[in-house]
């Protein structure tokens, strides 16, 4: 009986891991196969879908996405850092209520936020704002609560005695912030910024309302195309953008090392 | 908190500059959130209660939502889909979460990476993968036809099944994380003690691990439900034209029918569904906390 249970346990574990990895493997295989269907017929490898990526059709939305995600990561990083500093470190009056305000967008589904922003801009006659500016604004609203929460967590968790020690030793407030607090919370800030970059880069539910023809992000370009065809070039686009995301994470990990922070960023 | 009474001789000028600075630091965030979140949300809520031509308050749009048949069907479909995703995420995530919580071998890191890596791949890549797998001429149908088990392709895509599979895959890492956290909180000695006293593996799981991980099960189901209900890309691509959920219906109302008040009503219904679910979660959590603190005489 016990044997049966443990066989069942290992089997189900393996099955779930297969379930998780199967679509990823299939996409990589599709990106290298000459036809769109992943079939059991013998097929040879081809790199031509990756070669096709080097055209303005895919490069333009990719660069647009990178640009938007970079601006969003920078803005929400700075704003989140300042907000968390005011609320957690300085404990300004009403800090709990202010923190709830800062985190309140988290409880609204993205698609609802997206509708609200597009209706708002249309109502006040700012349709011209759609495209990159609206995407940046909406993505900042999306990313800012996450960044604020990550920075707030690291501000709340670092050893406050170090700060007190610096104070006793005569450091000014500015010196303490620059030499003690900022280095201590650097991993939290960097993981927040990385997270902001990724959620902006991969975002669909907000972007879908805010893009304009000719001013679109990579995921939206891909899903619009995907509704009509399963062209293998899409598999290549997806694999390439995943490789790009991994490179970004690797880069930030090299700069700041936030593996220990991943739990704070997992929601 | 940080400025203990140590600052015995605070220079008056520094004090003054520091009293306004935190507010100045906070204001850009609050400004951005009010202009691009609070204001649009308020306007959307207002729009759902406003007559389009005369701008007078009305409940017409809500009445239409409840009576046109399609909207309520979409609402129920969204709830059903999210419930199925919540159940399958929790069931599939449990063995992985248990392994991650209990394993001490080096395989743990491998499984952890495998379980969470898809999260970085983005929703489009995974949905594309499932499209290839579940299509009429896709991977599974091709395999089954090849083996001669079926004579015509099974209807695996463009329906509820495909959407639930795709969303389960999207949400699974989050379910695994919350189950894992909960199982890690269970003292492994309880399991060892039960085993030593002669309980079978099944009895240990049924009477110790499962009951003690109920909070994790609840939170995994809540996260999965809310993420599934608000997902857009997966239902749009895997569900096809025949499978409409609130998220895709809202999109159509805004961009094809250009019926903003009705889009607002639908968005409100989705928002209320979410808030109801999170309210259940908050209530459950506070009940559990108070029960735990009573039974253990105030833990921590």
Image (cartoon, coloured by chain):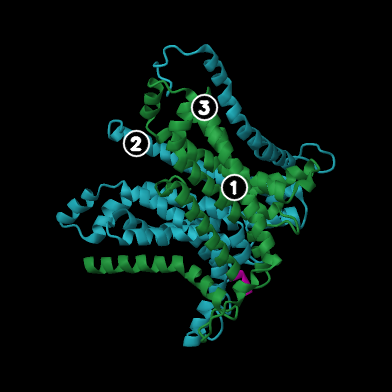
| Main SS, magenta residues | helix
- Name the residue carrying label 2: B291
Query: The disc numbered 2 marks a residue on which chain?
Result: B
Kindly report which numbered mark, 2 or 3, lies closer to the viewer in this rendering: 3
Is residue A159 at least partly visible in the picture? yes
Q: Does the image show residue A205?
A: no
> Mark 1 to mark 2: distance in Å?
31 Å
The local secondary structure at tag 3 comes to helix
User: Mark 1 = which residue?
Assistant: A109
Name the foreground residue: A97 vs A217: A217
Q: Which chain is green?
A: A
Q: Earlier in the sequence, mark 1 or mark 3?
A: 3
Q: Please tell me if label 1 and label 3 are on a single chain.
A: yes
Helix, strand or loop status at disc 1: loop
Q: Nearer the viewer, residue A264 or B227?
A: A264
Q: Residues within 10 Å of mark 3 (few under 14, many from 20)?
A: some
Q: Which chain is cyan?
A: B
Q: From the viewer's perspective, tell me whether residue B131 is left or right of residue B105.
A: right
Q: Which residues are magenta?
A: A231-235
Q: Where does residue B166 sit, x and y in percent of width and height?
A: 53, 64
Q: Position of residue A65 (x, y in %)?
A: 64, 55
Task: Reply yes or no: does residue B227 show up in magenta.
Answer: no
């Amino acid at each position: 009986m016990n044997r049966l249970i443990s066989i069942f346990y290992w089997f189900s574990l393996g099955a779930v891991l297969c379930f998780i990895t199967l679509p990823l493997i299939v996409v990589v295989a599709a990106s290298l196969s000459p036809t769109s269907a992943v079939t059991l017929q013998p097929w040879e490898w081809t790199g031509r879908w990756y070669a096709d990526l080097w055209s303005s059709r895919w490069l333009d939305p990719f660069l647009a996405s990178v640009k938007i995600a970079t601006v969003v990561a920078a803005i929400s990083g700075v704003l989140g850092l300042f907000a968390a500093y005011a609320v957690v470190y300085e404990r300004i009056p009403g800090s709990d209520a202010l923190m709830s305000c800062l985190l309140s967008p988290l409880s609204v589904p993205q698609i609802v936020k997206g509708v609200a922003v597009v209706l708002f801009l249309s109502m006040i006659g700012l349709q011209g704002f759609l495209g990159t500016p609206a995407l940046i604004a909406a993505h900042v609203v999306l990313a800012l609560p996450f960044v604020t929460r990550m920075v707030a967590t690291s501000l709340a968790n670092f050893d406050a005695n170090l700060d007190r020690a610096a104070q006793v030793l005569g450091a000014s407030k500015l010196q303490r912030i620059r030499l003690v607090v900022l280095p201590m919370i650097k991993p939290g800030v960097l993981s927040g910024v990385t997270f902001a970059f990724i959620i902006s880069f991969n975002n669909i539910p907000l972007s879908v309302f805010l893009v304009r023809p000719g001013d679109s992000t990579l995921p939206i370009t891909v899903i619009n195309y995907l509704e009509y065809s399963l062209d293998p070039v899409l598999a290549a686009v997806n694999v390439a953008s995943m490789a790009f995301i991994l490179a970004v994470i690797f880069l930030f990990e090299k700069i700041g090392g936030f593996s220990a922070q991943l739990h704070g960023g997992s929601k | 908190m940080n400025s203990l009474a140590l600052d015995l001789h605070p220079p008056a000028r520094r004090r003054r500059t520091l009293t306004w600075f935190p507010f100045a630091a906070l204001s850009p965030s609050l400004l951005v959130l009010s202009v691009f979140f609070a204001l649009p949300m308020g306007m959307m809520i207002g729009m759902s209660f406003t007559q389009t031509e005369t701008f007078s308050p009305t409940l017409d749009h809500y009445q239409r939502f409840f009576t046109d048949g399609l909207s309520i069907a979409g609402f129920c479909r969204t709830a059903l889909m999210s419930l199925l995703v919540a159940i399958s995420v929790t069931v599939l995530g449990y063995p992985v979460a248990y392994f991650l919580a209990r394993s001490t071998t080096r395989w743990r890191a491998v499984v952890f990476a495998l379980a969470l890596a898809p999260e970085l791949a983005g929703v489009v890549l995974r949905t594309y993968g499932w499209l290839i797998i579940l299509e009429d001429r896709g991977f599974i149908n091709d395999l089954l036809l090849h083996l001669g088990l079926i004579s015509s392709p099974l209807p695996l895509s463009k329906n509820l099944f495909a959407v639930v599979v795709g969303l389960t895959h999207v949400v699974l890492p989050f379910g695994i994380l919350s189950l894992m956290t909960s199982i890690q909180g269970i003292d492994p000695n309880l399991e060892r003690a039960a085993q030593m006293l002669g309980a079978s593996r099944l009895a240990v799981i049924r009477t110790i691990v499962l009951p003690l991980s109920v909070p994790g099960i609840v939170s995994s189901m809540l996260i999965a439900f809310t993420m599934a209900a608000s997902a857009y890309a997966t239902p749009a691509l895997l569900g096809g034209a025949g499978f409409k959920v609130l998220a895709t219906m809202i999109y159509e109302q805004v961009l094809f029918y250009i019926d903003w008040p009705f889009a607002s009503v639908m968005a409100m219904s989705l928002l209320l569904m979410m808030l109801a679910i999170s309210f259940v979660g908050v209530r459950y959590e506070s009940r559990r906390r108070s029960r735990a603190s009573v039974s253990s005489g105030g833990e921590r």
